[in-house]
């Protein structure tokens, strides 16, 4: 899994898509960390660190991307990773935390599907069919 994200980051870098490089690179580092044998609380801290990186990417995307739905997606992703990281901590883990990160990642999935559909319709029609919250 990590190799696929690493390959995606490399191809995005070659295409000069730096935001996509950051997202794929974050996921590659996260999955490489999981595959390297991180155990117990290390998984929690690795997951929380990935959430911090996604939050920084959301701030960068808010500043440079004309589409405002993308930072919203990245903020929900960061929140999901933070809550998922808390679920790996033995003192915090509970069914409520499991439900919370499940709901957050469901929201991430819905926003990602919406964003992909809206961008595809925008590119095919040449105008905003679904709102992308474009910066004027």
Image (spheres, rainbow, N blue to C red):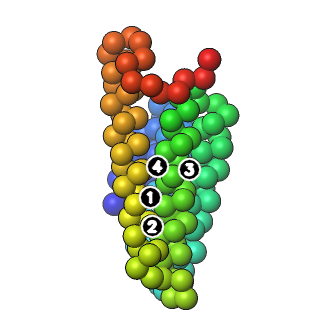
The residue carrying mark 4 is 24
Is disc 2 placed on a helix, strand or loop?
A: helix
Q: Residue 75 shows which numbered tag?
A: 3
Residue 69: image location, x then y, percent? 50, 35
Q: Nearer the viewer, mark 3 or mark 4?
A: 3
State which quarter of the image contains the C terminus: top right
Q: Is residue 33 above or below residue 95?
A: above
Graded by Cα atoms within 10 Å as few (under 14), some (14 to 19) or many (20 or more), the crowding at tag 4 reads many
State which quarter of the image contains the N terminus: bottom left
Cα distance between the residues tagged 4 and 2: 24 Å
Q: Is residue 50 above or below residue 46?
A: above
Asked if the residue under mark 4 is in contact with the one under mark 1, i.e. CB atoms within 8 Å, the reply is no
* Residue located at (60% from left, 38% from top): 61
The residue carrying mark 1 is 104
The residue carrying mark 2 is 100
Sequence-wise first label, 1 or 4 = 4
């Amino acid at each position: 899994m990590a190799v696929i994200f690493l390959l995606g980051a490399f191809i995005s870098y070659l295409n000069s898509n730096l935001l996509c490089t950051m997202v794929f690179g974050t996921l590659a580092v996260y999955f490489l960390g999981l595959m390297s044998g991180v155990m117990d609380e290390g998984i929690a801290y690795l997951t929380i660190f990935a959430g911090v990186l996604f939050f920084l990417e959301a701030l960068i995307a808010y500043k440079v991307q004309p589409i405002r739905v993308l930072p919203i997606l990245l903020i929900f992703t960061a929140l999901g990773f933070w809550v998922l990281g808390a679920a790996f901590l033995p003192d915090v883990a509970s069914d409520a935390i499991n439900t919370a990160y499940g709901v957050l990642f469901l929201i991430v999935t819905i926003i990602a599907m919406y964003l992909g559909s809206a961008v595809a319709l925008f590119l095919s029609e040449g105008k905003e069919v679904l709102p992308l919250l474009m910066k004027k």
